[in-house]
Image (cartoon, rainbow, N blue to C red):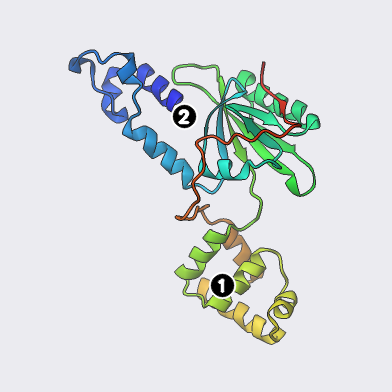
Amino acid sequence: MLELICFAEEAAPANDAAAIGRPSANDGYRGPERRCRPSPLTGLLAAMLDEIDYGMLLVADGLHLLHANHVARAELDAEHPLQVLGHELRARQPHDVAPLHGALTDACRRRLRRLVTLGDGSQRVCLAVVPIPAPGDATPTSALVMLGKRQVCQQLSVEAFARSHALTPMETLVLKALCSGTRPGEIALQHSVALSTVRSQVGSIRNKTGAENIGALVRMVALLPPMVGALRRSLPAVADHRPARAVAAGCG
């Protein structure tokens, strides 16, 4: 990401200098080694991406990883269909190489947006690959790879939604269960309560949130902005997992 920011700063017009934190030409020559020094904006942009509960990776020339946000670094474990070896994006399984290669090629060379599904079984994941043109360059050489959601409703968003509507702890548990697809009868069995109790709690949730029915309630939660917890474990800047079956999948 730092490489991209530095490039944008060099390409920006002089009258836009204040917007990106670079001095104008009247301030004198700073030298390339100082122009590419990390700016406050670089850190703010990285921190902003870390607060979004979607995994996002910025890839240059279809292979070289420039930046991965916190969620992407957390998700790309040794079993994920995508792997990062050093600073290169790889497909874990051989049969995923061609789809990933095609999506990255279309984004980097043809300015086409693609959805691609990689992996098998519980590790199956959908990716969105979007072309990212460099400033002043009509031909994209970079792509944004966005990882698909693993669940309809994110837990932190559900909890924030529950607090904002003054739901009780039990109502919050019922809401989480409904958002995961659990039926009221199953919720009653799981918590050893009568079905009428769960129905009463669902009614209370609907009254507090204004939802007409359970389907509308789940849709309300599913449309909430993705949020990341304030307490996150420390992760390296770029994941570096080395499974034996990882295969290169660049645009070259």
Q: Amino acid at mark 2?
A: Met
Residue denoted by label 1: 172
How packed mark 1 is, by other alpha carbons closer than 10 Å (few <14, some 14-19, many 20 or more), is many
**Viewer-side label of 2, 1:** 2
> Whole-percent x and y of residue 147?
62, 41
Name the element at disc 2: loop
> Whole-percent x and y of residue 227?
50, 53
Q: Nearest the camera: 241 or 2? A: 241
Q: Amino acid at mark 1?
A: Thr
Q: Residue at x 43, y 38 (%)?
A: 46
Q: Residue at x 49, y 55 (%)?
A: 229
> Whole-percent x and y of residue 212?
60, 71
Give whichever of discs 2 and 1 has the lower sequence position.
2
Q: Residue at x 38, y 17 (%)?
A: 11
Say the numbered circle drawn on residue 1: 2
Residue 146, placed above or below residue 89: below
